[in-house]
Structure formats: C-alpha cells, structure tokens
Amino acid sequence: GMSMLGAGFFIYGPQLALVLSLGSGTHVFVHSTRLGTFVQAYESRIIPERTQEFAINAANYRHWDEAVRLYVDDCLEGTEGPREKDFNMRWIASLVADCYRILMRGGVFLYPGDQRRGYRQGRLRLVYEANPIAYLIEQAAGAATDTITRILEIEPESLHQRIPVVFGSAREVARIARYHTEPSAIGERAPLFSRRGLFRA
C-alpha cells in the first residue's frame, strides 16, 4: 500500500463520476455528455475529522466481536448514551458508493471480521479493494485501518488476502481502534447502558 502511485474508482448513477488520486489529494470528476469528457467537480476533498454517521451491516450484529457491538450500541444510544449525541446509520452494501458518500459528507464505514466461518478476517480484499480505498481516504485527510492497524502499512501475504476494514473520518476511526485496544479509554458503563441497545433484549 505504501508504494502505491495512485488509486481511483468510477461510480455510476444519475451522473458518471470518477474519484481519483495521484498522491496530491482526492479529486472528483463528472462526465459531461456535452463535452464528451470528464470535468473536475471537486478538488482535494477533505473528510471532516468528526462525524455523527456510520455505515455497517447491522444484520450481522450477533456475529460481531464485543468491541464492534459496543461501538454500535454506544452510537445507537444517541444523546442518552455515553456518546451524548445522535448518530445516523447508513448501509448501501456497495464499497465505492459508501466511500463516495463519506468523501462528500463525512462518516465512517465498518466491515469488521466476525464469528462466522470464513469471515474472521472480513470479506474485503486487501490488495485491490481495501488498499485503493484507503489511499483515496487518506488523501482526503481521513483514516483507514483493519480496526487497529493502518491499512496501507499491512504487507500482503497473498493476492486475494481478506482483511477487516474501517475507514472515514479520522477521529472516529481512531475511536473505533480504541474500542479494540484500550477498553479503559471507553470509560465505565453505568447499569443503564450495560444491557441496552437496539439489538439487545
């Protein structure tokens, strides 16, 4: 990842967009049918450090590790929970669409590993999915990890190696890492918060 020279992706919708970085910021281009080429729409996108929006497939809640559950529960508690602010949850189930949204408005994306067979190391491929996205996100002042380690610093062991992926607003990505590495940094849980959550009985 550290030796990459550039990264990009196309996204198809009401307009055809190209997100591209060659090492000097992440830029967005849209296709002009009148001109027959791409024109720059946004130069050097900057992802806000803080966010109140996260993207994760909540259907897999029961399979997640405790750190991921705790993070999501804390977000869902909103103003009444330890985060003391409301969060929106999104899930498009498209890596590039979620990345594009985060580049445009901030947020954090999580595709963690979980307890299911074949999912312990996540499902996204390091070399040709996680690395390009991480490159684009970092060029836009965001952060990207495998929940703990910076993705671009991970040495590939095979072409199709899978890893867990967290990316987006830098402070939120760092907070998620602390849920995995520094339980004491999360703080004491009052009984009010120990069992509550949208997905808990």
Image (cartoon, rainbow, N blue to C red):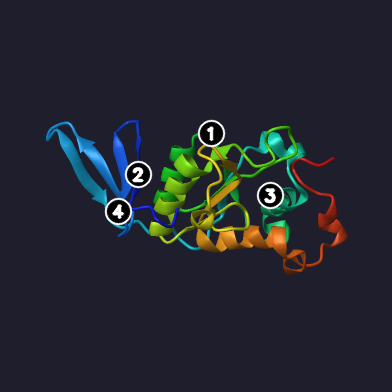
Image position, residue 106 (x, y; %):
47, 53
Tag shown at residue 93: 1
Image position, residue 121 (x, y; %):
65, 42
Nearest the eye: 102 or 80? 102
Viewer-nearest of labels 3 and 2?
A: 2
Nearest the eye: 66 or 49? 66
Query: In terms of sequence position, does the residue under pointer 4 or pointer 2 come before the other?
Result: 2
Image position, residue 67 (x, y; %):
73, 53
Q: Amino acid at mark 3?
A: Val
Residue 84 visible at all: no
The reply to whether dot 1 and dot 2 touch (C-beta < 8 Å) is no
Query: In terms of sequence position, does the residue under pointer 4 or pointer 1 come before the other?
Result: 4
Image position, residue 111 (x, y; %):
60, 43
Q: Amino acid at mark 4?
A: Leu
Query: In terms of sequence position, does the residue under pointer 3 or pointer 1 come before the other?
Result: 3
Residue that carries the numbered disc 4 in the rendered image = 22
Q: How far apart are labels 3 and 1 at the CA level?
A: 17 Å
Q: Residues within 10 Å of mark 3 (few under 14, many from 20)?
A: many
Q: Secondary structure at mark 2?
A: strand
Q: How far apart are labels 3 and 2 at the CA level?
A: 29 Å
Q: How far apart are labels 4 and 2 at the CA level?
A: 9 Å
Residue that carries the numbered disc 3 in the rendered image = 72
Q: Amino acid at mark 2?
A: Gly
Q: How far apart are labels 4 and 1 at the CA level?
A: 26 Å
Residue 152 visible at all: yes
Viewer-nearest of labels 4 and 1?
A: 4
Residue that carries the numbered disc 2 in the rendered image = 8
The reply to whether dot 4 and dot 2 touch (C-beta < 8 Å) is no
Query: In terms of sequence position, does the residue under pointer 1 or pointer 2 come before the other?
Result: 2
